[in-house]
């Protein structure tokens, strides 16, 4: 079956760095997405990886290892506004997104 | 660019009535639109995938006669919740995929519609 695993909740301190891990199992693979979702709002796109390696975009970076079925989202210089849920989603061979349950990130001052 | 709108943003209706939610891609053509439902503190649950001009593909467990989806044009899809019941109360989110999205197949999300059935 198809499955996405990510931690339910993480806590970090303002100004610090946090890494949110995601493992996936899908029928075929056409890339991995990370979305940010604030409470009561729709998800917003953060990153897309289809090749192995690290993609850096400002304070956010995303890493992919296709052989390990593993990705992580790295958030640097955390700000209070980064408190949100972070959704990992893998695209299968039919170009459908398989969603993880999301990781709720709590930032403390 | 790549803006998706939803209307209404929130709606309260009585049990037994029907509610229509519109999803529009404002500045691009969307060959495919997706409808999701999200209950509090849970992840997105894909309800159905719709392609312009063809019937929607529903996920297992989603009643196609209850959740009517129409994708009449490349910029508009509608979801109608028929004979709504309190258990249908949820956050409904649509997303759209561009006609030509390169290699990313990124989905652009609408702001969501919060439905409360009393």
Image (cartoon, coloured by chain):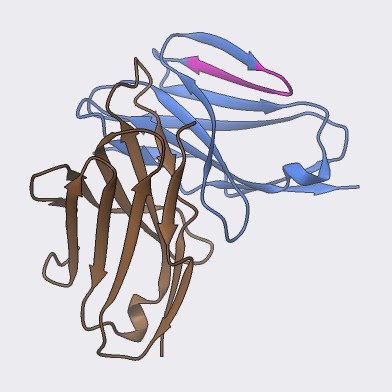
Answer whether residue B66 is magenta in the image.
Answer: no
- Total number of numbered discs in the rendering: 0
**Magenta span covers which residues?**
A57-64
Residue depicted at x 47% and y 40% = B3
- What color does chain B have in the rendering? brown
- What color does chain A have in the rendering? blue
Residue B16 or residue B62, whichever sits in front: B16
Residue depicted at x 34% and y 15% = B102
Residue depicted at x 36% and y 33% = B28
Main SS of the magenta part reads strand
Specify the farthest residue to the left.
Answer: B54
Q: Is residue B9 above or below residue A7?
A: below
Residue B62 or residue B3, whichever sits in front: B3
Viewer can see residue A74: yes
Where is residue B53? Give x, y as percent. Answer: 10, 44
Specify the farthest residue to the front.
Answer: B27
Viewer can see residue A105: no
Where is residue A36? Give x, y as percent. Answer: 58, 41
Where is residue A93? Give x, y as percent. Answer: 21, 25
Q: Is residue A30 above or below residue A34?
A: above
User: On the rendered structure, is B69 left or right of B97?
Assistant: left
Residue depicted at x 82% and y 39% = A79
Quadrant position of the N terminus of chain A in the picture: top left
């Amino acid at each position: 079956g198809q499955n996405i695993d990510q931690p339910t909740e993480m806590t970090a301190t303002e100004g610090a760095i946090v890494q949110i891990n995601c493992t996936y199992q899908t029928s075929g693979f056409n890339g991995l997405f990370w979305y940010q979702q604030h409470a009561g709002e729709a998800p917003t796109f953060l990153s897309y990886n289809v090749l192995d390696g690290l993609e850096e975009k400002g304070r956010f970076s995303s890493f992919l290892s296709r052989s390990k079925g593993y990705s992580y989202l790295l958030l640097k210089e955390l700000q209070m506004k980064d408190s949100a849920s972070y959704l990992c989603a893998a695209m299968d061979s039919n170009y459908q997104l398989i969603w993880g349950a999301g990781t709720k990130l709590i930032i403390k001052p | 660019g790549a803006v998706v709108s939803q209307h209404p943003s929130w709606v309260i209706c009585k049990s037994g009535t029907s509610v229509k939610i519109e999803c529009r891609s404002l500045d691009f053509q969307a060959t495919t639109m997706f409808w999701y439902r999200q209950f509090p503190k849970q992840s997105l649950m894909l309800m159905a995938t719709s392609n312009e001009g063809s019937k929607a593909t529903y996920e297992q467990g989603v009643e196609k006669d209850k959740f009517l989806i129409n994708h009449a044009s490349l910029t508009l899809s509608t979801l109608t919740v028929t004979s709504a019941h309190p258990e249908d109360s949820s956050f409904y989110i649509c997303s759209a995929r561009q006609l030509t999205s390169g290699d990313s197949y990124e989905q652009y999300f609408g702001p969501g519609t919060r439905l409360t059935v009393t």
